[in-house]
Structure formats: C-alpha cells, structure tokens
Image (cartoon, rainbow, N blue to C red):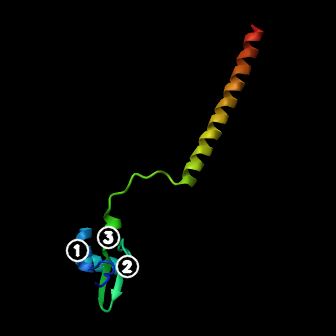
Amino acid sequence: MTERGPEIVPLAAAAQRLGIGVTTAYELVKRGELPVPVQRIGRQMKVLASDLDDYLAPPRAAEAPPSSQAHWAEHIERHIRDLRHQADELERFVARELGRS
C-alpha cells in the first residue's frame, strides 16, 4: 500500500471553493494576494486542500492568548488600585468636611 501525500487541488478548483473566478484567482496570485499559499508545479498552480480548509473554516471562539490575558489582568488590577485610592481620598475628604461642621 502506498502512502498518499497531502491533497493538492488545481488553482481553478481553489478559486471555485473561494467563491471567485479563475481569472481573479490568477490575478491575486500574480499580486501575491491570494489568501492561501500557491505551489507552482511545472506550469500549473496548485493549492493544498488543507490550506483551503483552514482558510475557509469558521473562526473558533478561542480563549485569549495567555499574554493577552496577563495584559488585561494587569490593566484591571491597576484600575482597581486607582479606584481604591480615589475611594480612600474621598473618605478622608468627607471625614474632614464633616469634622468642620
């Protein structure tokens, strides 16, 4: 039994899956703007089916990357510290003003 490599599709089939015309696909390749990598095999242009699948797959609701989570946690903690500081200042101000009455 022979082992098969990754599925490779012609640019025309890729264009159809992307919902664009073949001419547009060739133009995008020429400008380097096709959203998936293109392999030139001889005179033909091919695309890995897995690249098309990845591009066309609906976005997954993923958790924010850990670095992003850390950034937001730090931001929120800083905001909470600022609010506590403001609350303390307000409490001292009210105490002073009530002491004057």
Mark 2 or mark 3, which has the lower sequence index?
2
Q: Is the C-beta separation of discs 2 and 1 under 8 Å?
A: no
* Rendered position, 39 above or below 99: below
Q: Give percent across and percent down for residue 58.
A: 33, 58
Near mark 1 (Cα within 10 A), the count class, few <14, some 14-19 or many ≥20, is some
- Report the quarter where the N terminus lies: bottom left
Q: Tell which tag, 2 or 3, sits nearer the viewer.
A: 3
Q: Give percent across and percent down for residue 27.
A: 31, 79
- C-alpha gap between disc 2 and disc 1: 15 Å
Q: Tell which tag, 1 or 3, sits nearer the viewer.
A: 3
Judged left or right of residue 21, residue 84 is: right
In the rendered structure, which amino acid carries the disc numbered 1?
A: Gly
Q: Residue furthest top?
A: 101
Mark 2 or mark 1, which has the lower sequence index?
1
Q: Nearer the viewer, residue 12 or 98?
A: 12
- C-alpha gap between disc 2 and disc 3: 19 Å
- C-alpha gap between disc 1 and disc 3: 15 Å
Q: Quadrant of residue 78?
A: top right
* Rendered position, 59 above or below 2: above
Q: Secondary structure at mark 1?
A: loop
Q: Residue at x 27, y 69 (%)?
A: 18
> Residue under circle 1?
21
Q: Quadrant of residue 19?
A: bottom left
Q: Secondary structure at mark 3?
A: helix
